[in-house]
Image (cartoon, grey):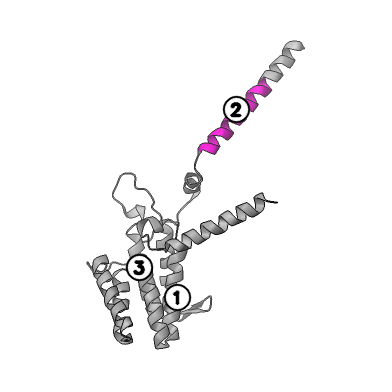
Amino acid sequence: MIERGSNSKTALVTVLVAALGLSACTDEVPVAKLHHRTHVSPPAVEPPVLPAGSFDEGLAAQRLQDGKIALQRADLPVARSATEAALALWPVAIEAWEQLIEVCQQQGDDSCRRYATFYHAKLVMLNGLPMRAAALGFETVAANPPGAKVDDMVYDQRMLDMATRLWVFCSREDPSHATAAEPTESTFDEAYPYVPALLVIGLAAGLLTGIKAVANK
């Protein structure tokens, strides 16, 4: 009887040690890696093929500057055409969408303002998401028929064309299209770091404030 009790105590100690060991190992695994392992992306759908040279970051920057100068001169038609040209060449440029919002507001074009605000918000919300998720999001918008109404937004042909362009653009960074043996899945903000730093700083400050409030209770 004594020997059996000794074995039970030994088994209990072994289980506790093993449990503590697993807990310690879990603490050493970064949260981001755990999230990445549990993320399951849907099967990729091939986007449409656009002509070579459809995207050009350098030329887009030039067109954006042309639009900025025209806006300063209050030449709104030129400012709008130049800004829209910049977005066609590099549609993830947050600054270009903000400039288009300003031009549309000054022109009193509410439809244009809603269009620009819609895609500006979409791009900001992609911060931290995998590129495949970004591509899928724009693919979902592009799949709507003209005239479809989603969340008080009517998808006209202009919105659908931009969704398709962004779908193609983001799909270039989808690891399923990479040729490397073990591609890594980058996030949207890693590939295109256009989200304003102040947004990230504001979110971090809010989080720290919440932590301090809880700690002081």
- Could you give the CA–CA distance between mark 2 and mark 1, rounded to whole angstroms? 54 Å
In front of the other: 40 or 71 = 71
Image side of residue 207 versus residue 143, left or right: right
Identify the magenta region: 11-28
Image side of residue 54 versus residue 22, left or right: left
Residue beneath label 3, please?
Answer: 93
Q: Residue furthest bottom?
A: 108
Residue sitting at x 62%, y 52%:
212
Q: Main secondary structure of the magenta part?
A: helix
Amino acid type assigned to the residue bearing label 2 in the image: Ala
Residue sitting at x 64%, y 26%:
15
How many residues crowd mark 2 within 10 Å: few (<14), some (14–19), many (20+)? few
Q: Secondary structure at mark 2?
A: helix
In front of the other: 62 or 201 = 201
Residue sitting at x 38%, y 68%:
94
Decide: marks 2, 1 in contact (CB < 8 A)? Answer: no
Sequence-wise first label, 1 or 3: 3
Q: Is 14 part of what is drawn in magenta?
A: yes
Amino acid type assigned to the residue bearing label 1 in the image: Thr
The image quarter in which residue 141 lies = bottom left
- Could you give the CA–CA distance between mark 3 and mark 2, rounded to whole angstroms? 51 Å
Amino acid type assigned to the residue bearing label 3 in the image: Ala
Residue 173 image offset from top left, x and y in percent: 34, 57
Q: Secondary structure at mark 1?
A: helix
- Could you give the CA–CA distance between mark 1 and mark 3, rounded to whole angstroms? 13 Å
Q: Is 26 part of what is drawn in magenta?
A: yes
Residue beneath label 1, please?
Answer: 117
Sequence-wise first label, 2 or 1: 2
Q: Relative to 59, does residue 73 appear above or below in the rendering?
A: below
The image quarter in which residue 17 lies = top right
How many residues crowd mark 1 within 10 Å: few (<14), some (14–19), many (20+)? some
Residue beneath label 2, please?
Answer: 18
